[in-house]
Image: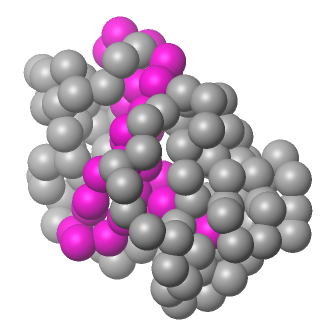
Amino acid sequence: MAGAAAGTVVLAACGSSGSDSSQGSTGGSPAAAPAGTTVGTLSDVTVGKCKSVKVNGQDAILARPSETTAACFSAICTHQGCTVQPDGAQLKCPCHGSVFNALTGAVEHGPAETPLHSIPVKVDGQNVLTA
């Protein structure tokens, strides 16, 4: 990775994409997207905020911690596979109450014990691409 500015997207106060909270597979590990797949653009996400996106057909969160950086996480809770929902600076699981930090994907409140799975991304101009 070419440094933090090249691809660490953070999750913060986000809007919901309206996706449902149905359960998926436990663990929430995202399917690998081919490197160079467009996730979004920097202009899609306000600095300090995040947005729900799809990566390789999977629910994900695209965050923008600064003007030049972005981060991406699976939106699938690592507890039992429900889709987390943005809520201010947190991502909340509607099924069992787990709470994740929207900027890092770290667990803030269980029952989940594992952070959200990171999806490696890089910034290329204004585009956010899988790395």
Q: Can residue 42 be seen at all in this image of the molecule?
A: yes
Whether 31 is drawn above or below 117: the answer is below
**Residue 62, percent across and down?**
38, 41
Report the residue at 54% width, 27% height from top.
13
Structure colour scheme: one colour
**Residue 105, percent across and down?**
63, 47
Magenta segment's dominant SS is strand
Report the residue at 32% width, 70% height from top.
58
**Residue 26, percent across and down?**
61, 87
View extreme (bottom): residue = 25
Report the residue at 87% width, 62% height from top.
110
View extreme (right): residue = 110
In screen coordinates, is 99 left or right of 43?
Answer: right
Report the residue at 54% width, 83% height from top.
23
Q: Can residue 2 be seen at all in this image of the molecule?
A: no
Quadrant in the rendering for residue 115: bottom right
Whether 126 is drawn above or below 38: the answer is above
* Total residue callouts: 0
In screen coordinates, is 125 left or right of 67?
Answer: left
Quadrant where the image shows the N terminus:
top left
**Residue 46, percent across and down?**
35, 17
Residue 82 counted in the magenta span: no
Residue 60 counted in the magenta span: yes
In screen coordinates, is 7 left or right of 118?
Answer: left
Q: Identify the magenta region.
A: 48-77
